[in-house]
Image (cartoon, grey):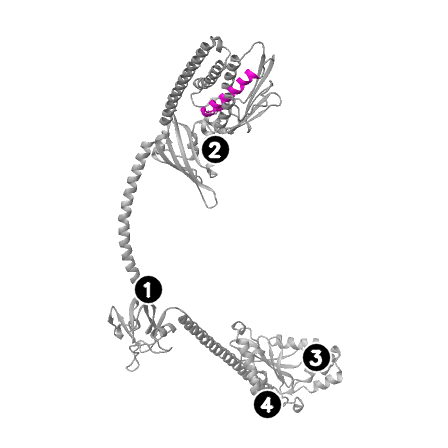
Amino acid sequence: MKGKLSKPDTGKKRVEEIPGQSNQCFMLKLETSVSDPGKTANLGLSDIINVQAIKPLMEDFYKLTHIPIGINDLNGNVLVSVGWQDICIRFHRAHPEACKHCIESDVELSSGVTPGEFKLYRCKNNMWDIVTPIMISGKHVGYVFGGQFFFEDEPVDYELFLSHARKYGFNEEEYIAALKKVPRLSREAVNTGMGFFMTFASMLSQLSYSNIKLAQSLEERDAVVNALRESEKRERIRSEELKAVLDAVPVAVFIAHDPQVLQITGNRLSCEWLRVPSGTNFSKSAPEGERPGMFELFKNGVKIPPEKMPSQMAAAGMEINDCELDILFADGEIRHVLGNARPLHDEQGNLRGSVSAFIDITERNRAEEVLKKEHNNLEKIVGERTVELEKAYNSLKESEKRLAEAQRMAHIGSYDWNIKTDEEYWSDEIYRIFGLDNEFELNHNIFLKYIHPEDLDRVSHAINEALRGKPYNIDYRIILPDGKERVVYSQGGVIFDEENTPIRMRGVIQDITEHKKAEENLTRIEVARKKEIHHRIKNNLQVISSLLDLQAEKFNNREYVKDSEIIEAFRESQDRVTSIALIHEELHEGRGDDALNFSQYLQRLLQNLFQAYRFGNTEICLKLDVEENIFFGMDTAVPLGMIINELVSNSLKYAFLDRETGEIRIKLFSEEEKNETGNKDVKDVLSERSPRYTLIVSDNGTGIPENIDLENSDTLGLQLVNILVDQLDGTVELKRDHGTEFIINLEIHDS
């Protein structure tokens, strides 16, 4: 029966052929499992034992004892089995319900077994099993099972197994045949086998624990190796980065690699400075024959021994700051450098060398020398300029005092109006002119409040025009805080920015009150003087007229000259004198200036002429069409009055002989449209009028004979008209269509 139980050499050849490969795969799997510390506590039995390695041992055991053996985890899973019977494999574990009994037996019936002991129990499928636990680091991870046997001293209940066959639908013959193959063991053999099981379980525990520790050690070793590799990689990268940084910075860096400073190397710039290839030893403390001879170090003109050099002193533990040195090269060139040096320590704090960094200040020193010279020169210039400025300042203060005094004496002050801020600055004299204290706060609106209400619009208009770029000069009245009035003259100019926007207005204000009063007094005196002159001229002309009248009367009493041309000549001369006298009379009675209201004068002149030449019953009417308030100066009024006198008197004497009625027409007008005079000053009226006028004198009488040539007339009157028209730069035209019509165009020059 024992020989029929199993085939103990199954798979042995394959296991022997690849034991090394199996063990490598197992260790790789185990290392993978323990690589994550969080998973180590959750390792299962299948993760810990090498099934392929222990299966040959289990097969040898079965070959000797014929006791079926297996290793199960805590979930009832069979990890490895040797000698298991067909009744179990083909029937019990092949049927779901029967398999359920197998697993329940493995898990439930085997629980509670103390480590180092075993348990013998009958499974739910009525065969004997033996179990002992597998422990790893005090943790229960699985079982070693022996079983699927009967004791040789107990009968087998075939009826019970037949009922199982019928219950689960097994083939009874095959099932009973498999039952008969189940081993029948003595109790002594079972006890011996159980000793092996416990030893085997203990061995599995120890080997598994060792495997875990070994895997963890290998994993830790690999982690350390990887960390070292990463550290080396990072250090290599850092070293490369540091080298790149040191080569990139515009600073010469020197590194002493030992406390004795036997070797000093530097970055790219340091090699360029000292004119040597990279890696050259710069140390002056190096052994004889290795010391560099291409340069020497000096401080304040004194050569520095090696032990006093910055790298050596820092390697001895000193911190060197702002060390300024001179590097003297073999060719005589000197480089001035400035830098610091610091000691380097190892992990234990021991000195291991030094690092120093220097910059080239050669050009800076040269620039400082130049700047020093320039500074000295500048100080000299500043001193001289300061003296000049003090003189200029004193002169300016003196000029300001003189200006203020001159402004006070001339009653002229200056102002500055900031248009953007509406702030206004006044000199002291303007404050005095306006009767205000110097502390009075000003702005443009406050200034406008002191202007006389009747002048405010005119001043505002003038300022607005100035802001458009027009000149600004104006007289206006101001009202002082005490109610007094003053007359001031203001002149100024506007400053514009680059966008042609007004930003400031500056100018002067002069108190001309007394000047205005003096002007008014002089005007009154001049008016009185002119009136007196006109009055005397008028009186003298009237005396002449009276003398002419007396002389004419004297000739008139003589019969042989009663109707002669002599009397007529006296009368015409008297009319001419009268026309001139009327002008002076009008000027005497007028405003007192040299401007004559020609409209009023013309009416009086014509009235006198009509009174002087009224004949018999002839009715002669006058039609006068003259603009009102025409003002002419003496140079125009006298010749123009005499022209009208000659033409009208000629019409009165000759145009209406042997006629009962007649009409004389006089028209005087400017060629441009009439200007409104209102209450304007006479000078303003004259300046606004057009300088060209037209005078038309006509009548509806018999007319001037065709044989009389106006330009070559032999009569004194027409000759006088031509002369006076030429005097006025005018032209005269004669028309004979319906009576007589003289058209005279004049250009007026006086005002």
Element type at marker 2?
helix
Q: Secondary structure at mark 3?
A: loop
Is 69 or 147 nearer to us in this picture?
69
Task: State the image quarter where residue 130 is shown.
Answer: bottom right
**In the rendered structure, which amino acid carries the disc numbered 3?**
Ala
Identify the residue under disc 4.
17
Few, some or many residues within 10 Å of mark 1 (<14, 14–19, 20+): few
The residue at the point 46 percent across, 32 percent down is 460
Name the residue tied to disc 3. Answer: 94
Q: Quarter of the image for the N terminus: give it.
A: bottom right
Q: Residues within 10 Å of mark 3 (few under 14, many from 20)?
A: few
Q: What residue is rendered at 29% in x and 82% in y?
A: 289
- Residue located farthest toward the left when viewing the structure as drawn: 302
Q: Earlier in the sequence, mark 1 or mark 4?
A: 4
Question: Which amino acid type is shown beneath numbered disc 4?
Answer: Glu
| Residue occupying the far front of the picture | 560
Side (left or right) of 70 relative to 171: left
Q: Position of residue 142 (x, y in %)?
A: 58, 78
* Disc 1 target residue: 364
Q: CA distance from mark 1 to mark 2?
A: 65 Å
Q: Earlier in the sequence, mark 2 or mark 3?
A: 3
The answer to whether residue 249 shows anywhere in this view is yes
In the depicted structure, whether residue 162 falls above or below residue 337: below
Horizontal relation, residue 109 to residue 240: left or right: right
